[in-house]
């Protein structure tokens, strides 16, 4: 009897320590604050694209929140820089209001992880502003934080994946 894996035979999920029902429950129960969102990095809405680029460079971040009187009115990401500033050839002194994504989709620290994931998936977002009840920024949730959360639930599967999971050696290796 061979113990080598075959393409048609997979070990049961429980043998890898995977508990899909636990993840499903936790996605509904755990809040966004459990994901430990990054501290918010923001600039005022009166700034320019150049100000935003400088702030992103200084903070080594991929997005900034745009605020007005302390409330989130927009978000400016690397994608916005590429598609709304550099690609059309606009100068860096362009007002940030012309380059940002206005009225971004947000989440609250009390929202479920499932809600955040659904909003990210629906809009194709890699970052979501986390705001309090008054609309003031309290953090930024990144796709990276969500991935780390999922890895906590599936460590055996994630850390043991071969580079090409559907490819099997043609000859046995080893002694």
Image (cartoon, grey):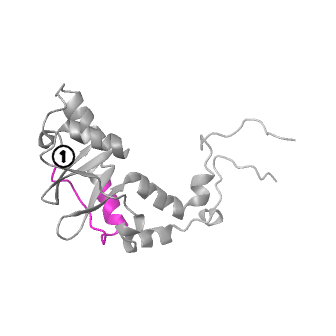
> Does the magenta run of residues contain 113?
yes
22 is higher (above) or lower (below) than 69: below
Secondary structure state at the residue bearing disc 1 = strand
Q: Give the residue at x 19% y 34%.
A: 84
Q: How many numbered marks appear?
A: 1
The magenta segment:
102-121
Q: Residue furthest top?
A: 89
113 is higher (above) or lower (below) than 98: below
Q: Residue furthest right?
A: 175
Residue at which label 1 appears: 101
Q: Give the residue at x 20% y 37%.
A: 49
Horizontally, is 6 left or right of 51 in the view? right
Residue 61 appears in view: no
Horizontally, is 95 left or right of 54 in the view? left
Badge 1, how many Cα within 10 Å: few under 14, some, many 20+?
Answer: some
Q: Could you say which quadrant of the image residue 47 lies in?
A: top left
Residue 175 appears in view: yes
**Quadrant assignment for the C terminus:** top right
Q: How far from the left and from the top, in percent, is residue 170?
A: 73, 35
Horizontally, is 134 left or right of 62 in the view? left
Q: Nearer the viewer, residue 97 or 27?
A: 97
172 is higher (above) or lower (below) than 160: above
> Does the magenta run of residues contain 146?
no
């Amino acid at each position: 009897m061979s113990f080598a894996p075959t393409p048609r035979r997979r070990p049961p999920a429980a043998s890898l320590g995977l508990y899909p029902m636990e993840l499903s429950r936790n996605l509904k129960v755990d809040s966004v604050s459990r994901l430990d969102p990054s501290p918010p990095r923001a600039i005022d809405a009166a700034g320019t694209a150049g100000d935003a680029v400088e702030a992103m460079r200084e903070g080594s971040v991929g997005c900034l929140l745009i605020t007005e009187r302390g409330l989130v009115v927009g978000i400016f990401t690397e994608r916005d820089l590429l598609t709304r500033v550099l690609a059309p050839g606009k100068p860096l002194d362009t007002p940030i209001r012309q380059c940002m994504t206005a009225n971004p989709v947000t989440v609250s620290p009390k929202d479920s992880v499932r809600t955040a994931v659904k909003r990210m998936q629906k809009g194709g977002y890699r970052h979501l502003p986390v705001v309090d009840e008054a609309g003031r920024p309290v953090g930024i949730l990144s796709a990276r934080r969500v991935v780390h959360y999922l890895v906590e639930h599936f460590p055996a599967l994630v850390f043991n994946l071969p580079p090409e999971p559907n490819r099997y050696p043609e000859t046995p290796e080893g002694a």
